[in-house]
Image: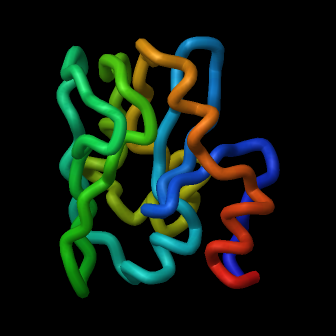
Amino acid sequence: MSNVLPDLKYTKDHEWVKVEGNLARVGITDHAQAELTEIVFVELPSVGKDVSKAGILGNVESVKTVSEVFSPVSGTVKEKNDKLVDSPELLNKDPYGQGWIAAVEMNNPDDLAELMSAEDYKKLLGE
């Protein structure tokens, strides 16, 4: 059973969003990191990059595969988690904490209304 935090929003592609004012902090879910297994490389977006909702935010490479990380909201990347460059395993160890990927300044907060609650995400996972 995956760890699903109640105060976050989720996408069907297994990204999570923590809303911090006008910022959406984004990462991959516990379920996603478990499916990927050992994460060995993370490609982060550039600060200042404009992203569209469902556009590619970055890539996560594991020993099994390379997965795209999609932006759950449209806006501009304001922060990226440079710790992941040298320590990609943080995505496995702490996906909801130190393993965040980027923070996007939202240009359309209505994007959040289309994301799933923790309960809906658990249903998607069949839990």
Tell me where residue 60 sits by quadrant.
bottom left
Q: Position of residue 70 (x, y in %)?
A: 33, 49
| 82 relative position to 8: left or right | left
Residue at the spot x=73%, y=62% of the render?
Answer: 120
Q: Is residue 122 above or below residue 42?
A: below
Horizontally, residue 65 falls left or right of residue 89, namely left
Q: Is residue 46 left or right of residue 114?
A: left
Front in this rendered view, residue 85 or 119: 119
In the image, what residue occupies the spot 59% across and 52% down?
A: 10
**Residue 79: x and y, percent?**
37, 23
What residue is shown at x 72% (from left), y 70% (from top)?
Answer: 122
Corner quadrant of residue 55: top left
Which x, y percent locates residue 87?
34, 56
The C terminus: image quadrant: bottom right
Q: How many marks?
A: 0
Kindly indicate the quadrant of the structure image that contains residue 76. Answer: top left
Position of residue 97 relative to residue 94, above or below, is: above
What's the residue at 22%, 56% (across, down)? 59
Q: Quadrant of the N terminus?
A: bottom right
Location of residue 121 in the rendering, given as x and y in whole percent from the top left corner: 67, 64
* Residue 44 position (above or below residue 19): below
Q: How is the image coloured?
A: rainbow
Asked if residue 125 is positioned above or below residue 18 in the image, the reply reads: below
State left or right for residue 97 relative to residue 27.
right
